[in-house]
Image (cartoon, rainbow, N blue to C red):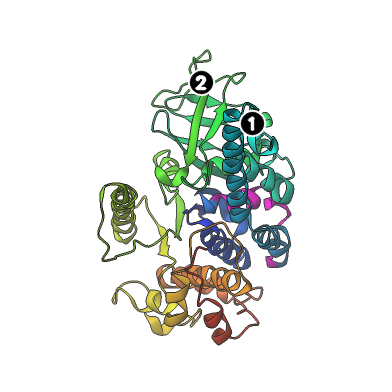
Amino acid sequence: MFEKDIICALSGGGFRATFFHAGVLRALVRLGLKDRIKVVSSVSGGSITNALFGIRYDEIGNVENFDCQVLDPLIAFSKRDPRNALLRYRAMYFLNRAVATLGMLAGTPGNPLTLFASRTNSQLFIDQLDALLFDHKTLADLSKNVRIVLNSTNLNNGARFRFDNEDFGDYKTGYSYEVNHLPLAQAVTASACFPGLFSPIKMDLRGYKFFLRDSQKRDTESPSPAPDFVCLSDGGIYDNLGYFSLVSEIKRGRDAFILISDAANRFQINNEEYRFFGALPRIKDVLMEQVSNRDRQTIMGRLLDESDKEWSGLYFKMENSCRWFRESLPGKGAPASELPILGWSDSTVSRIAQIRTDLDEFNDAEVQSLVYHGETVTETTFARWHNDSYRKISRDSGYLPPVPPKCPEKGIFEGLANSHKRL
């Protein structure tokens, strides 16, 4: 019914991205396309969903399996409020340092709160992921029937450092095949290691064999010298859409259907006055926004170019409603009159677009709105731009339409009133 391989990119954006992308993958499962998914590449919050999907992939046959194996554990993880646990830990760390300093001045050196001197907040997040989602699994435990790519940024050499179930590394460091020894939770944390909340992960490379590769992706005959360690941070620093792995797949000749799900934070316009120190993070935001915009323009240009035979698929931003996707770009794609009427109203989507990009506890309205939005946007854009394939799927006797949350939209709208607030 649908013959092409599907290759997906899941952007960053904290738990907002985690749950929106869960809705995207849920739609593909519900439409009977799960087995066509061959690559899922992700950064930051998208990697939490991606990694869990990767270890549960073989157990998912329908939406009920998906909810049990992926969505429900993600909700339970959010309920543990990992962001605030990390902030409390950091506060205790600084208290520990202050007490130790006072002790030294008083002639009694030492760290009285030894627990808070022994681990970084990144290690604490790794422990949370292992306890609640990944159960100490390694990269080798990811399904062999789908390629799961978790992307981070190597702060030492500026390259994209990626992890999958066959190898890990970057083109400057080389690649190691020893995936049996690398914890999945460590790879996810490296991908989601947002500056300011997490310390960069100092990954010890001693004991691993790394091989550099030539332009044809062939390994050198013998291992290459690698540094003793690399410092890894959020994959969104290098590529906040997570789509570079898809470009590599296409360059290697894969004829695939591309799906890029963008839940990244929208750039906030304001009237603030910026001085020296306050300007530094704002400059970083401007630079990242410009890079992301160039990526988006490239993606849209290639997907809309009918003469481009390499790129076929979908790109959508979380901040747009299903109505917008039905009616935008008149004269292209299937007409709105032939498309299903799905999804939230524009006013509800405007609140969804303002949900914070954070890793704290998300309430029921936030989770339900994001998952249903991801699910209905995926189906609407698929119906709009690939209508022949969609009609075959939707007319099949096994087709199930998306089911809205039990809570009425008014209740969802009211439940999102404070969702933009971080603290």
Would you say the magenta stretch is mainly helix, strand or loop?
helix
- Picture coordinates of residue 45, whole percent (x, y): 53, 53
The residue drawn where x is 48% and y is 60% is: 357
Residue underneath mark 1: 179
Amino acid, disc 1? Val
Q: What is the residue that sits farthest to the front in this orientation?
A: 106
Q: Local crowd at mark 1 within 10 Å, few (<14), some, or many (≥20)?
A: many
Q: Local crowd at mark 2 within 10 Å, few (<14), some, or many (≥20)?
A: many
Amino acid, disc 2? Phe
Image mark count: 2
Residue underneath mark 2: 211
- Picture coordinates of residue 23, whole percent (x, y): 57, 65
- Label placed on residue 354: none
Q: What is the residue that sits farthest to the top in this orientation?
A: 222
Q: Which residues are magenta?
A: 47-63
Where, by quadrant of the figure, is residue 130 drawn?
top right
Residue nearer the viewer, 30 or 270: 270
Left or right: 196, with 123 as reference point: left
Where, by quadrant of the figure, is residue 19 drawn?
bottom right
The relative height of residue 382 versus residue 286 in the rendered view (above or below) is: below
The residue drawn where x is 52% and y is 81% is: 413
N-terminal label among 2 and 1: 1
Q: CA distance from mark 2 to mark 1?
A: 14 Å
**Is residue 73 in the magenta section?**
no
